[in-house]
Image (cartoon, grey):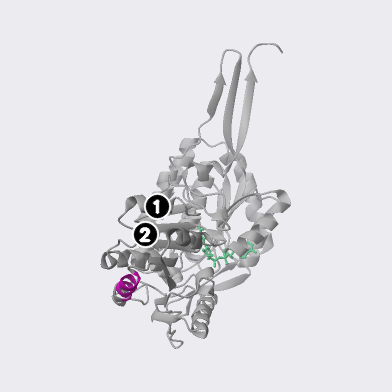
Amino acid sequence: MIDFNADYQMTLNGRLVQSERTLEVYNPANKDVIACVPDASKEQLDRAVSAARTAFKGWRNSTISQRRSALIALGDAIDSHAEQFMSLLTREQGKPRAGAEWEIRGSAHWCRAMAEFALADEVLVDTPERQVITRYTPLGVVGAITPWNFPVLLAIWKIAPALITGNCIIVKPSPYTPLCTLKLGELCREFLPPGVLSVVSGGDELGKWVSSHPDIDKVAFTGHTDTGKHVMRSAAGNLKRITLELGGNDPAIVLADVDARAIAPQLFWAAFQNNAQFCNSTKRLYVHEAVYDEVLAALVDYAASVVVGDGAKPQTQLGPIQNLAQFEKVSEYFEDCRQHGYRFALGGRIDSQAKGWFVPVTLVDNPPEDSRIVAEEPFGPILPVLKWRDEADVIRRANDSRYGLGASVWGRDLVAVRRIGEQLEAGTVWLNEVHQYAPNQVFGGHKQSGMGCENSLHGVMEYTNWQTITLNRSGSV
Ligand code: NAD
């Protein structure tokens, strides 16, 4: 029986272990310390890696049906512990119940769906004389490094493809949100041989040890673009395979023919879901000048109905900022807008006396294109709303970014919506919808939003080497 409220330990070679040093974990809604977790030493990481290397000898030869059963069992176990995971996720991350449910149920669904993603051998030639086959062989030991905004789902996006392809994996969660991941590791002991999956907790230093470790074969990383560049550099030591899912500055383009009142809730949640601590949040909202005033007014009205507060309260729809460093970073954008005299259509003032790291939902009325709030990724609930007139110009502005993660286009003229969408430089372009993900849908960033992809068979292949086997049957030897 797993206690989700206490006893947070690492899973290392199938055993639960503490470490000499610990890290404090906070509830962002009230700044209380809710747990102390191990801060892994370099030696503990080495032990996890060597256990994974040993386990790989057996796991790589397990049958696809054994691996499939393990993943399905894990998905079912996440579902059967969903209540405990959800309430712990709210406490450590801050997200309200609906968001926690989406993440935990989604994680269970992803495990089961990815269990079906077998990479069968491909027979290219099969004649009496010759056979040529392409195989997909596991890489070995994968290091997964995850951020604090969707700690469980983004770990599963790495665990599921790693395991189904026969790799072993070591998961390092963000020091801000390690609790659910540690419990996930504990849970996995029921379904996986020792060493196949380990969870090690620690700070950024531990992330560096993972990405530079000579016996780790691949790093799957989700986090900031700048951190991703560090990972890429340190992965070069042993030419690790890397998948990088990085930052975004997603534009949404709203055409002149929309119904402002009808679209406002959809645009609101496109931007503010998970309190805008979302790689795929709409972070620049381009509204055609013909409907700009109406859309802005409808957004302000809709925002007034949204309840911000402690995610543990049932009525809450938006929680706090997850950690102090992020709170300070988001506060800087408020200050920058104020200093430059940009107009706040809503919000703009942070209550420094609030019990938790709360920031009000804020809309900035048509700031300049080169302002920090437009050009950078605030990762908090402050959204620039921008006017456009000319289609070619708004496409140019939307693409004028180092990022290329996601984008959306909204309008009744589906031909125009499609025409604009196809010109956007982003890994996912949503048309009249947003934030729709699926296990069989490839996900990844263009430009500096990432490298490689997750999900779909393309994402699963990133956990394998290609191997060509050729056989000469002619008997000439
Ligand atoms: P972060 O880069 O600060 O940290 C992510 C992880 O990397 C943490 O576990 C951290 O401890 C570790 N880390 C830090 N420095 C490291 C180093 N030098 N080497 C190795 N590991 C290191 O990111 P964050 O603040 O946790 O997350 C927010 C960012 O993540 C945003 O930019 C957001 O857009 C991005 N993100 C991207 C996606 C995506 O799928 N593209 C999804 C979610 C979040």
- Residue at 49% of width from left, 41% of height from top? 457
On the rendered image, what quadrant is the N terminus found in? bottom left
Residue pointed to by mark 2: 102
- Mark in the foreground, 2 or 1: 2
From this view, report whether residue 272 is shown above or below residue 245. Answer: below
Name the one closer to the observer, 7 or 268.
268
Q: Are marks 2 and 1 in contact (CB under 8 Å)?
A: no
Neighbour tally class for label 1: few under 14, some 14-19, many 20 plus, Cα within 10 Å: many
Task: Give the residue type at disc 1.
Answer: Ala
Q: Is residue 463 visible?
A: yes
Q: Nearer the viewer, residue 121 or 166?
A: 121
Q: Position of residue 422 (x, y in %)?
A: 44, 50
Span colored in magenta: 292-300
Whole-percent x, y for residue 122 in the image: 53, 28
User: In the image, what residue occupies the spot 32% across and 68% down?
Assistant: 291
**Residue beneath disc 1:** 108
Q: CA distance from mark 2 to mark 1?
A: 10 Å
Query: Which comes before the other along the chain, label 2 or label 1?
Result: 2
Q: Main secondary structure of the magenta part?
A: helix
Q: Amino acid at mark 2?
A: Trp
Q: Position of residue 142 (x, y in %)?
A: 60, 50
